[in-house]
Image (cartoon, grey):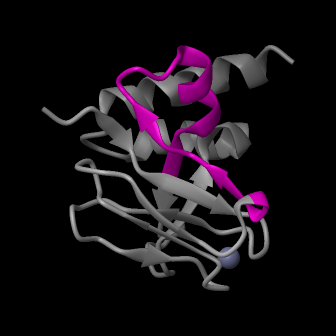
Amino acid sequence: MNTIIQNAAYCKICNEIVVSKERHDFETCNCTSISVDGGTYYVRRSVKDVNLYEELVLTVNSTFDEIINKLVWGTRGKEGNVKLHYFLIKSLDINHLQAILDNVKNIESLHEHVIKYWLNTKKDK
Ligand SMILES: [Zn+2]
């Protein structure tokens, strides 16, 4: 049974979030400081400096707080024509969050849940 929900890390040098989706999906950030691997099977990291990256792995044992703060969203832009890029869902603005709910079919329930959480939280401010 897979217990990993998200296999990701954030590079503080180039500000890129890298995500490994599959078992042998080895992904490296733009400045090559960090690499992630393993998908939902295992968590493998190659890191040049442990102080310059932030761990974004989520498992079924992660707390609600960890999930709402670390879950990422991948996008290819409004027209779908730019390189796949990941953002923390919590960092997206209200318009973007609403657009995802309006336009993305077959959204995973966890992502939908977190998007709605941040939409409501940001609207209340
Ligand atoms: Zn980097």
Can you give x and y, in whole percent of width and height, for residue 91 in the image? 72, 44
- Which sits in the foreground, 86 or 77? 86
Q: Is residue 21 left or right of residue 111?
A: left
Q: Is residue 123 left or right of residue 57?
A: right
Q: Is residue 36 left or right of residue 33?
A: left
Q: Residue at x 23, y 61 (%)?
A: 22
Can you give x and y, in whole percent of width and height, for residue 49 in the image? 72, 69
Looking at the rendering, in which quadrant would you find the N terminus?
A: top left
* Count of picture labels: 0
- Which sits in the foreground, 24 or 83? 24
The span picked out in magenta is 51-73
Can you give x and y, in whole percent of width and height, for residue 82 in the image? 51, 81
Q: Residue at x 68, y 37 (%)?
A: 90
- Which sits in the foreground, 120 or 3? 3
Q: Residue at x 53, y 17 (%)?
A: 63
Q: Is 39 inside the magenta-drawn segment?
A: no
Q: Taking 41 as reference, is 31 above or below it?
A: below
Q: Taking 122 as reference, is 77 above or below it?
A: below
Can you give x and y, in whole percent of width and height, for residue 99 in the image? 53, 44
Ligand 1 shown in quarter:
bottom right
Looking at the rendering, in which quadrant would you find the C terminus?
A: top right
The answer to which image quadrant residue 111 occupies is top left
Q: Is 64 inside the magenta-drawn segment?
A: yes
The answer to which image quadrant residue 109 occupies is top left
Residue located farthest toward the left when viewing the structure as drawn: 1
- Which sits in the foreground, 66 or 44? 44
The answer to which image quadrant residue 115 occupies is top right
Q: Residue at x 35, y 74 (%)?
A: 26
Q: Taking 67 as reference, is 28 above or below it?
A: below
Residue located farthest toward the right when viewing the structure as drawn: 125
